Image: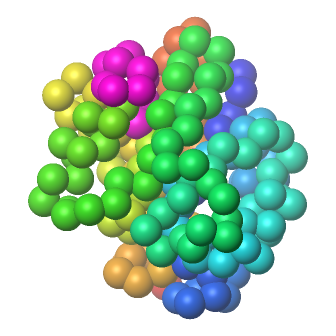
């Protein structure tokens, strides 16, 4: 059963110094890694690339400069599950509408949307689209804790676990 590490909003070095070791270990152990944007610097992207032992799918966030050369939206196929990855940039009041709309435009309602931006963990279904936000893998403000997700994929479904470090 493939395991996907889902992370976002590293904000290194501006708001955080590094990804915590327990999360580094989870990223390295995953079969695939999704990063939903806001690395902030090329060194942070390089760190995640080094940690990922399997494929990395990453998108640009609103705090990422053009030097990272990442797409705004990307997809990852794992078994019979399609993940549509975007950052979710924009007004928090329309976040779920915006991310679900992107998922529908790219792959329809059968796909799972992954986005960051808010630094708040989210696992919900919005207008028929499952949306995941792993929060901030470094606990960067405005997050109140350090979080990430893993998703185990089997038989066309996913089992999502939120991992958190208080502090």
The furthest residue to the front: 66
Image vertical order of residue 94 relative to residue 92, above or below: above
Query: From which residue to which does the magenta span run?
Result: 104-113
- In this rendered view, identify the residue nearer to me: 21 or 69: 69
Q: Which residue is at 64% across, 22% downward?
A: 78
Image vertical order of residue 66 relative to residue 17, above or below: above
Is any part of residue 162 visible from this angle? no
Q: Which residue is at 67% across, 70% downward?
A: 67
Image check: 142 left or right of 24?
left
- In this rendered view, identify the residue nearer to me: 98 or 35: 98
- In this rendered view, identify the residue nearer to me: 58 or 142: 58
The image shows residue 48 at horizontal and vertical percentages of 75, 62
Whether 46 is among the magenta residues is no
Whether 112 is among the magenta residues is yes
* Quarter of the image with the N terminus in it: top right
The furthest residue to the left: 93
Image vertical order of residue 128 relative to residue 164, above or below: above
The image shows residue 121 at horizontal and vertical percentages of 37, 57
The image shows residue 41 at horizontal and vertical percentages of 66, 78
Is any part of residue 153 visible from this angle? yes
Image vertical order of residue 127 relative to residue 109, above or below: below
Q: Which residue is at 41% across, 83% downward?
A: 141
- In this rendered view, identify the residue nearer to me: 159 or 138: 138
The image shows residue 43 at horizontal and vertical percentages of 76, 76
Q: Which residue is at 42% across, 21% downward?
A: 107
Colour treatment of the image: rainbow
Total number of numbered discs in the rendering: 0
């Amino acid at each position: 059963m493939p395991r996907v590490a889902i992370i976002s909003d590293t904000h290194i070095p501006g708001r955080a110094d590094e990804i915590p070791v327990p999360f580094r270990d989870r990223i390295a152990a995953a079969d695939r890694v999704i990063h939903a944007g806001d690395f902030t610097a090329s060194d942070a992207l390089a760190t995640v690339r080094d940690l990922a032992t399997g494929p990395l799918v990453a998108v640009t966030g609103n705090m990422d400069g053009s030097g990272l050369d990442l797409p705004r939206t990307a997809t990852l196929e794992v078994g019979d599950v399609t993940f549509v990855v975007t950052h979710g940039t924009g007004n928090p009041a329309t976040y779920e509408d915006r991310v679900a709309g992107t998922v529908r435009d790219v792959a329809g309602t059968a796909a799972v949307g992954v986005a960051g931006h808010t630094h708040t963990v989210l696992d919900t279904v919005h207008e028929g689209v499952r949306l995941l936000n792993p929060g901030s893998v470094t606990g960067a403000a405005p997050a109140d804790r350090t979080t990430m997700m893993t998703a185990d994929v089997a038989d066309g479904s996913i089992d999502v676990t939120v991992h958190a470090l208080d502090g």
